[in-house]
Amino acid sequence: MRIGIDLGGTSVKAALCEEDGTLLSKRSTPTRTGDAEGLCADMKLLALALCGERGISPDSITSIGIGVPGSFDKATCTLKFGTNLGMNNVCFADAFRPEFGCAVQLDNDANCAALGEATAGSAKGARNMVMVTLGTGVGGGIIIDGKLYTGSNGIAGEIGHIVIQRDGEQCGCGRKGCLEAYTSAASFVKFAERALAEGRKSILQKNAGHLDAKMICDAVDAGDALARELFDEYCVNLSIGLANFINIFQPESIVLGGGLAGYGEKLLEPLRRLTLPQTFQSDARNTEIVCATLGNDAGLIGAAML
């Protein structure tokens, strides 16, 4: 049995999984931000509770994995900078002792989500896949030959920061023209607000200054011309990034997660149509573009499988 933990700024979630990634049970507790000692104690209590409700001895757990936001040192199992958690330089290597004697693994929460989808989600069985999370930013993870690819220093996979337009929109990372600057939910809203400020007519005007990505998608469904224009441009920009990933990795699947992936086939259809003509293809097999299916459980399952 394995335990996966997802550290979030609002809650700490933990799950007990079988060796194949099957989720057996899960629990959560509010995050004690700024309290490293309390956070470690809460994680151990969650892990013990999961074992207790299944009648499993803690020493039978083979691995504990933690998905974290922010930067970390994988070798020492240390969260270096956890802004959303209000704490830095927290080592989790011994947080579960003495009850648990297994190794504790640490990785980025987006990497864990990718591993979860590859293990038990929409890319189950895929040996090579890329996950792209379309949230406030654009993150994701890369699976090569069934394993997370994290590079020589453990921080590879910042797929939101490939440049798709030279000297383009300013990105939060400091560069210009990044995929994230064009295809995150935040950028989608920014372009809509910019258009409204320039005097463009739209049903979105009633929510100007308070828009979110779902409102824009709903306006597309309602036949709003500006919303459709913004969405079409969004898909063009995202297709450039997806085509790059396919041409570099030729994965079996690209899995889209995050809030915007909730648009489902309405997003997938134009993306497939726009992306695939930009890619090198074979007669044997080509990349599928699909949406994630595990939701918030992806990070838990992926963490357990580290």
Image: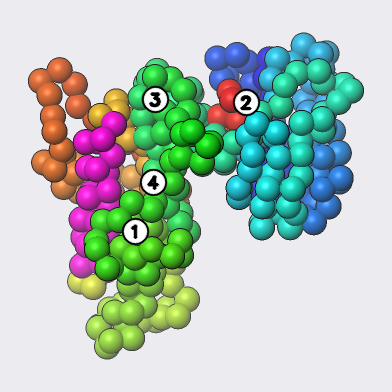
* Labelled pair 2, 1 in contact (Cβ < 8 Å): no
Q: Quadrant of residue 128?
A: top left
User: Label 1's element?
Assistant: loop
| Residue at x 42%, y 28% (from the top left corner) | 143
Left or right: where 249 falls relative to 13: left
Residue 140 makes an appearance in the image: yes
Identify the residue under disc 2. 304
Identify the residue under disc 4. 159
Amino acid type, label 3: Ile
- How far separated are the C-alphas under marks 3 and 4? 15 Å
Q: Quadrant of residue 84?
A: bottom right
Amino acid type, label 4: Ile
Q: Is residue 178 above or below residue 264?
A: below
What label sits on residue 178 in the rendered view?
1
What label sits on residue 144 in the rendered view?
3
Left or right: where 84 falls relative to 159: right
- Which of disc 1 and disc 2 is earlier in sequence? 1
- Magenta span covers which residues? 228-249
- Which of disc 1 and disc 3 is earlier in sequence? 3
Amino acid type, label 1: Cys
Nearer the camera: disc 2 or disc 3? 3
Amino acid type, label 2: Ala
